[in-house]
Amino acid sequence: MSWSLNKRLPALLACLLLLTVAALADHPSTGIAKSPLKIPQNFVNVHILRNLDLSSAVVRELTTVVVKNVANDAQSEYFVPIPEQIDAHVAIVEASNKKSGTQLEVKKDSFDSEKLIQYYKVILQQPLQPQEKDTITLKVVYTHVLSSLPKHIPQVAKQFLVYTGNVFVFSAYTSEKQKTVVKLPTTTVVTYTNNEGTVTKTGNLINYGPFNAISPHQHTRLYVHYEGTKPLPTFSRVRRELEVSHWGGNLAVEEHFELKHDGARLKTQFSRVEFQQSAHVHAQTAVLKSLTFTLPAGASDPYYRDEIGNVSTSNFRSTPRGATLELRPRYPLYGGWNYTWYHGYNLPLDAFARFNKEKAVYVLNVPFLKTVTDATVDRAIIKVLLPEGAINVKVTLPFAVDSETHGKHLTYLDTTGRYAVVLEKHNVVDEHAQNFQITYEYPPLELLRKPLAASAAFFALFVISAVLSRVEFRITGKVR
């Protein structure tokens, strides 16, 4: 008996579904559509000089580029490529005009999903006319790109680090001539790439090039294994709180730190006796014994505490130009060791906040974050507590942050809570120690909020006390 059309249709659909599944199994999809990104070849790098500084835990790359416009019309956008695996370690990308020193705008632009390259766009100071030249300076700061080799060393031993990169300047444009200079902390080098054209070593400098006619995106592995005598300090988390008090004219600062040493770990157990006996050679090892913080001028009343309590091994020096706080942890830090603590101090508010009479607003100008020199902060949290009653709060930052939140924070004698601004950013380095501004309105009557609140609380307490004093709580009765 023949099937009807209604009975044949489901069977045909099932067969098509099975064929589709089989085809997908034979040719799996990646799930991401890869599309090539073409950067217009409007420029030619006439000459490039790159200085790669490996003398600290934070790697800094300073590149001077003489660019020439080879297009038929004026151009104002210069693209800088950074491979995806390296871009995750980029802390900051800056550009400036070498002749005038003017900072140029840098934007994180397109991503090439086929070549896995992240592009940054530099806006030139003024459009460059055809066949004209200009010189720009690029600064890129990298974190966590150094590794120790060997991974484990004796307690009294030198530390050696490894850097892997590119012999050539990774550029989106053809380079007529380029040279790379690698700066090391010492003259001791175990091995380095020495098979690409002209390579010379002078003292603590390794020179690569000059190279001619380098094509775009050219890459040759650069490997340097060298002695690193400095520690590799990394702050896993830093929480900084700034409390503004117009009533007391004070800016209270408290900073909480979670520090770890990313250097080579100890091969054996730590020996306090060996540590004391080898004090004269500690400068040649990577042990971290003290931390020095540069504080603003006018800092006073410092304190330094950890989980155990107050730490007395600190030294505070104040001068008219600034202050220095030197902290000595309870124990020396070797590779893989951690230490947590917090310290604080007071600052005069009039040195950081001013009143703009034209706009009738207060302008708070404070540093974003300043830690130990050449240290990396994986995650920074900046919390600013404005006076209770502050309104129309606006934040102006010199660089992008991961998040900016506004809320309330309750402290003593508060009624509705202080206005709180919380900023978060990862991969923070010395270059981020810039000032940011917070503008807010603070009506003069708000200064009376706390005294009135305290007076009202005391008055209510007296009233309740007076009422309770007149109430009879004893149970009395006649005794028969």
Image: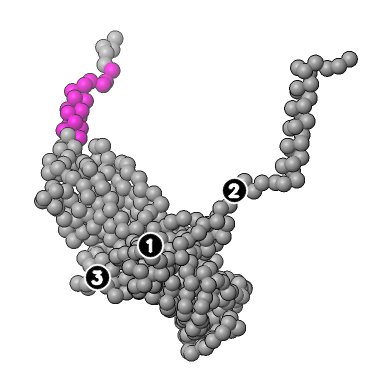
**Image quadrant of residue 344?**
bottom left
Q: Look at the image and say whether residue 402 sits in the magenta stretch.
A: no
Dot placed on the residue nearer the N-terminal end, 3 or 1: 1
Mark 3 and mark 2: Cα distance apart in space:
54 Å
Give the secondary structure at mark 2: loop
Q: Residue at x 32, y 74 (%)?
A: 98
Residue at numbered disc 1: 77
Where is mark 2, residue-wise?
Answer: 32
Earlier sequence position, callout 2 versus callout 1: 2
What residue is at 51 percent from the left and 88 percent from the top? 201
Residue found 30% across the figure and 46% down from its top: 420
Residue lying furthest left: 357
| Residue 222 picture location, percent across and down | 56, 76
Q: Are marks 2 and 1 in contact (CB under 8 Å)?
A: no
Q: Which mark is residue 412?
A: none
Q: CA distance from mark 2 to mark 1?
A: 29 Å
Q: Identity of the amino acid at label 3?
A: Gly
- Of residues 1 and 72, which is closer to you in this image? 72
Per the rendering, the mark at residue 322 is 3
